[in-house]
Amino acid sequence: MQQKLHIKKMNILNNVIINKNTMLPIQSNQKITEIISLDYKLIPVLSRLGISFGFGNETIEEYCIKQNMDVHFALEILNSYHNPNYFPSNRLSEFKTELIIQYLLRSHQYFLYKKIPDISILINELIADGKDKSVQNVSLLNNFFKEYLHEIELHFNEEEVNVFPYIRELQISVTNKTCSVELTEKIKEQSIIKFEKDHSNLEDKIHDLKNLIMKYFPPIINQYISQKLLLELFRFEKDLSDHARMEDQVLIPKVKILEQEVISQAKKHIN
């Protein structure tokens, strides 16, 4: 009898835990202020979607309609960042390619001109605050971070100068049902598969930076600034992971389809 009661209590407890961990998706009729209260980490995501402060009591749908924005795209992005288990790649792939590119471009701007400078400021504060061996350790961290910054700049530049224009060219070709010899040659020479292979995991070095702080920094370093820096690196790592997921699971499969459609159109023109 006691064993049955114990099992019953455990089942009830498990149900409570499951219910607590269940995330309801963000809905179009939710106020933007409610969405931020639900998950404050979505503030920069809202900004990258083009949603600025001053929205009053508007719902996400009301704001998007007023600003001539795609509310369905905004909801899919917000839910994907809010809940790591929510990633409807099939639904996201239905949106226009340009919509996805514009979001990724805004993400680049956010990383390069907001997030990375914030991290750099914290590293410089550690350098200014440290002494002797502490300064040497933080300088090592700073050099490591600068190398990483160079890599991420190269990666983003490759996307903006070569990959995104290539995708736009594919989309125009498919939309207009035209095909040039130059474009078919590009598909052979610089297919999105090449970009996929070269798409380095930018999260790896962030992981190394975190470990450098947690495992090897001496305790004399300013703990408050170190904690702030570590938190920023964790947030940055998560943001980059979501960014890479958007490219790998949504954009690249969509581009592969566009490439196949262009090749099919080219064969029809030959025949």
Image (cartoon, rainbow, N blue to C red):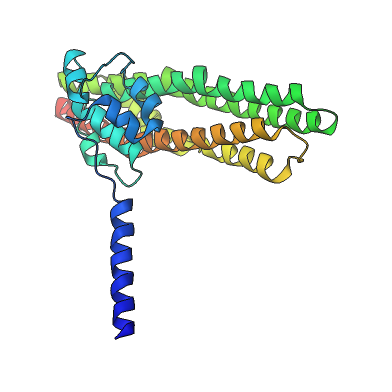
On the question of residue 262 being in view, the answer is no
Please state the horizontal and vertical placement of residue 26, each as a whole percent of the image.
24, 36
Q: Camera-side residue: 87 or 5?
A: 5
On the question of residue 245 being in view, the answer is yes
Q: In the rendered image of this protein, does residue 224 appear above or below residue 124? A: below
Q: Camera-side residue: 29 or 173?
A: 29
- Tell me which residue sits at (60%, 36%) in the image: 230
Please state the horizontal and vertical placement of residue 57, each as a whole percent of the image.
23, 20
- Tell me which residue sits at (61%, 40%) in the image: 210
Q: Quadrant of residue 87?
A: top left
Q: Quadrant of residue 83?
A: top left
- Tell me which residue sits at (34%, 31%) in the image: 37
Give the position of the C terminus as an image quadrant: top left
Please state the horizontal and vertical placement of residue 42, each as a whole percent of the image.
37, 30
Task: Using residue 137 as the reference point, say whether residue 153 is left or right of it.
Answer: left
Please state the horizontal and vertical placement of residue 163, each as a whole percent of the image.
39, 24
Q: Camera-side residue: 254 or 45?
A: 45
> Which residue lies most toward the bottom here?
1
Task: Using residue 20 as the reference point, say whether residue 69 is left or right of it.
Answer: left
Task: Using residue 210 as the reference point, say whether residue 80 is left or right of it.
Answer: left
Q: In the rendered image of this protein, does residue 120 appear above or below residue 17? A: above
- Tell me which residue sits at (50%, 32%) in the image: 236
Task: Using residue 60 as the reference point, say whether residue 199 is left or right of it.
Answer: right
> Which residue lies most toward the right here?
132
Q: Camera-side residue: 66 or 219?
A: 219
Give the position of the N terminus as an image quadrant: bottom left
Tally of numbered tags: 0
